[in-house]
Image: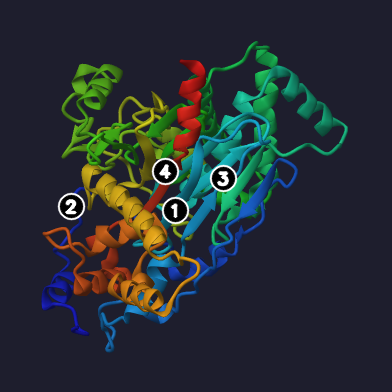
Amino acid sequence: MSSIVSPWVIISARSTISTLHGKGRLYSRCLSSQHKVAWRSLFTNSSFSSFLASCNRSMNNVVTVRKAFRHTSTEEEDFSFHLTPSQINDILRANELSHTISEFDGKNPSSVLKFESNHLAANTPMEDRRSAATCLQTKGMMFGVFDGHAGYACAQAVSERLFFYIAVSLLSQKRLEEIESAMESMKPVLPILQWHKHPNDSFFQEVASLYLEQLRVYWQDLLNMDMEPGFTIEEALIYAFKRLDSDISLEVQAPSENELVRNIALQVAFSGATACVAHVDSVHLHIANTGDCRAVLGVKNKDGTWSALPLTRDHNCFNELEILRFKRGHPPSEEDTVIVNNRLLGVLMPSRAFGDVRFKWSQELQQSVLGNSCNTEALNIYEYALPNYHTPPYLTAEPEITYHKLRRQDKFLVIASDGLWDMLSNEEVVKLVGDHLAEADVQKRQLTFKKPANLGYMQNLLLQRKARQVQSYDQNVATHVIRHAIGNNEYGEIDPERLMAMLTLPDDLARMYRDDITVTVVYFNSDVIEAYYRENE
C-alpha cells in the first residue's frame, strides 16, 4: 500500500480548483486559531438542566485519536497520507454511539429495538451535531441530526434545546401546571428527557440558565393558551421548531451584561443549522425536517431485497415546491433574484434553516445588533450586505412533517446529514445497512460455540473467523456506512488508498472533498410491531 496519495490530490489542493459537488455553504467554516481554545472551553459534558433531563451515557469505549493523524496544511514538509489499518479504525470509530432500548415498564415495550450512530468531521471544528432521547413524561423516543453552516454554534444550540421544546409541547396542561408550580416553590422537578449521548457530545453550559428561562417562558405561554387536549404530535413538532427559532432571534436582541452569553447568542443567531428529527411512538413515526438532512426508511421486500422509502424532501433550490414557495412569498419583481445559481439570494444552499438571521432580519436590525460593541471578527461573523435583499424574511425554520405508520416490513430508519447523501444514494445506504444487518446475523450464528465443542469444530471456527476478518468488521452500522461513503471506488468497493487519503486530508483541504458526515440508524422491533397488528386486527 502506498504511503503517499496520488499526486492529483496535492496538485488540486494547492491550486484550489477542486470543490465538493453539491455543496455551497456560506461563510468561513472554522474559528480563527486564537479563538478556538476560548470557544471550546464553553463546552461541558453535563446537562444544562439536571432537574429537567437525565443523561444516559454510552457504554462504548471512547477512542482518543492522536492529532498527528490529521495535518493542518498541505504545506507541511512531512505531509503524508499513510495510516495503518488500526489507525484508520480508530479514527472512524472514535465517535461511535450505540444503545439498546429497554422496555418502559414491562407492559409497553418500545417499537425501537436499538440505535447506532457515528459522525466524522471535515470542518474544523465539526459543524454537525446529533441527539437521541427518550421522553420520560410522554411516550416515545426522539432522534435528530443537525447540520450547521457558518460555524457550529447554531447546530449546537438546536441539538440541545429542540427536544425540550418538543417534549414540553407534548405535555398536558395538568403536567405543565405541576412543573410550573414546582418551579415557583423551588421544589424538585422530574426530568422530562433521558439523553442517550456519547461522552464527546456536549452542552453550552455557560448559557444554561438563559436556555432554561426561555423554555420556562415557552411552557408558561402554553399554559396561557389553555389548550385541551393539547397539541397533536404534528402540531407540537411545528410549533416547537418555530418557537425555538424565534427565541434564537430574540435572545440576541435582548440586552445582556454578560459578554460571554451575548457572544454565544450572536454566534448562534448569525450561523445556521438544518434539522431532521424523528419521533417514534409505538408504530407511529413522525419526521420533522427543516433543510437538507434526510430520513430514509429501510424496507425489506418479500424476496429478501431492500427498498428505500424517503420520508423527507430536501429543502433547497432544486426542490420545485420550494421554488414555488419563494415565488409566492415575494413580489414578482424579485422572481429572478431570490434564487441565483441554485442558491438563496445566490449564497445559501438550504432553503429552510434555524438561525441565519442575516436572511430573516431587516438590514437596519442587523446593523443595530452587530454595531452594538460587537467584535464580529473575533466571533467569525462577517459583515456584508446580501444582494437583492428587499423583502425579508427569505428563510424559515418551519418544518415539513411526514407521518408514517410502521409496517412489518419496515426494519430501520436512517437519518443523516447531507454529507452522506452527497456521497451515496438512498438506495445505496439502505443496501449497506441491510447487508450489514444480514452479515451480523450470519456471524452471530456461525461464530457461536456449540457445546460441547470438539477440537475439529474449534479449528474450523477459528478458520472461519480468520477468513471473515472478524477483527476488521464494523460492529456499528453507522461506521460501516461512513467507511463506504468516503472509501468506495466506482464499483462500490472499499479502495484502501482512497479511504486512507480521505481520512488524512488536512484542515485546508478536507472540506474541498467531503463534508461533515453524521449518521444515525434506528432499528425497529419487529416483534413489537407484529404484536401491535395482531392486537388491532
Residue type at mark 4? Answer: Ala
| Distance between the alpha carbons at the discs numbered 2 and 3 | 38 Å
Q: Secondary structure at mark 3?
A: loop
Q: Position of residue 467 (x, y in %)?
A: 28, 73
Q: Secondary structure at mark 2?
A: loop
Relative to 52, is 271 on the left or the right?
left
Dot 2 or dot 3: first in sequence order is 2
Residue 273 badge:
4
Residue type at mark 1? Answer: Ser
Other-residue count near label 2 (Cα within 10 Å), few / some / many at <14 / 14–19 / ≥20: few
Per the image, the residue denoted by label 3 is 101
| Distance between the alpha carbons at the discs numbered 2 and 1 | 25 Å
Residue ID at (32%, 72%): 464
Dot 2 or dot 4: first in sequence order is 2
Indicate which label's residue lies in the foreground, 3 or 1: 3
| Distance between the alpha carbons at the discs numbered 3 and 1 | 14 Å
Dot 2 or dot 1: first in sequence order is 2
Per the image, the residue denoted by label 1 is 117
Indicate which label's residue lies in the foreground, 2 or 1: 1
Q: In this picture, is 447 found above or below 170?
A: below
Per the image, the residue denoted by label 2 is 21
Dot 1 or dot 4: first in sequence order is 1
